[in-house]
Image: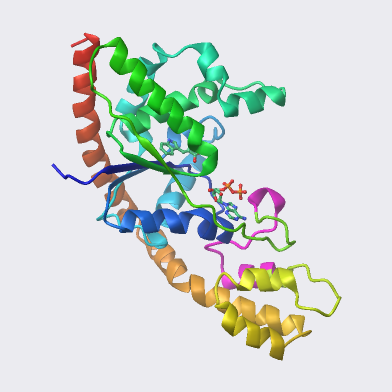
Amino acid sequence: MSAKPILVSGVKPTGDLHIGNYFGAMRQFVELTKEGKYRPFIFVADYHALNTMQDAEEMRRRTREIVMAYIAIGLDPKDVVFFKQSEVPAHTELAWIFDTLTTMPYLMRAHAYKDAEAKNREISVGTFNYPILMAADILLYDAAVVPVGQDQKQHIEIARDTVEKFNRAYKTDVFTLPEPYIMPDVAVVPGTDGQKMSKSYGNVIPLFGTTDELTKAVMSIVTDSSGVRPENVYNMHKLVRSEEELGMIYHTDAGNYKRLKELLIEDIDRYLAPMRAKYEELQSDSSIVDDVLARGRIEARAIADAKMEQVRQAIGVA
Ligand code: ADP
Ligand code: TRP
């Protein structure tokens, strides 16, 4: 048994990753798994994604894309148990057991549900129940730390409440309390129009795009004609080059927006090239991802199945 505290996190198989996702979240996440302080279990939250994605081909493609993306940016599958949520049936099985201890009014207080309500949207039972599946994801592995964005903090609270409900109801200590690890807020990465970069605004620089796509995106960066430093170009440039060097460059080529954009293209291209190369290698040999997920499935199942044995004993079905 490893004595290291367990880290668990789920990544949604949402595709079309952009450099805002990378600099804003993915990079810090991968760094955390590399610190060596934790034993990380990372899974693709495909059953969570079913709530919003109902296309089999898209599900398959995006699942592979997210696995390739994390490996390409530096997640080392040797250090991490990397698996698909759907391949460890204990997640949904445990979610059912937690459902029986959870009341409707309790889940109605969750932000995600309240937001949907406020917008008068009809939500699926799966979406309503999302925090319970997430509690199962976390508690199955005795997670000590759960790195998430600020928006997920309430879900960790729900997992903690669920530990207490279960342990009290069955007079046991089968589950341990997880702690949230809120990823430090990093600066918002601006898009080509100066607003927050987001796939829903169509202002992104793709993370694994071709040089042509990168060129097109950078050339479309909105600049004003006031003659001062083109802020939208500069703010993006800061991500890939030190401000000290940029000070000189933006002084020398002040006003020459075309030249500055060309330099930005070169610098982003150089920065992303190794990740893109790794991504392409993974794309060209599908067995690498298959092997990672197959190993992850075996390791995750072993832990999850052992926990389910304790749960079955505790609730009296075994
Ligand atoms: P999008 O806005 O493109 O739909 P998501 O909401 O899927 O992106 O974001 C996934 C993760 O990437 C979140 O943790 C979010 O904080 C981070 N992220 C997305 N866009 C940016 C950005 N422009 N700057 C910083 N972080 C970002
Ligand atoms: N809900 C998380 C998100 O939207 C993804 C997720 C699912 C997760 N299960 C998890 C994160 C378990 C941490 C632990 O980003």
Point out the stretch of residues depicted in magenta: 198-217
Q: Is residue 98 above or below residue 199?
A: above
Q: Is residue 104 above or below residue 152?
A: above
- Corner quadrant of residue 90: top left
Q: In the image as oriented, which residue stretches furthest toward the right?
A: 226
**Residue 149 at x, y = what percent?**
50, 44
Q: Does the magenta-highlighted stretch encompass residue 17?
A: no
Residue 70 visible somewhere in the drawing? yes
Total marks placed: 0
Position of residue 255 in the picture relative to residue 139 (left or right): right
Residue 63: x, y in percent? 44, 45
Q: 237 and 271: which one is in front?
A: 237
Q: Residue at x 16, y 45 (%)?
A: 2
89 or 60, which is in the foreground? 89
x%, y% of residue 37?
27, 53
**x, y percent for residue 11:** 44, 44
Report the quarter where the N terminus lies.
Answer: top left
Q: Quadrant of the C terminus?
A: top left
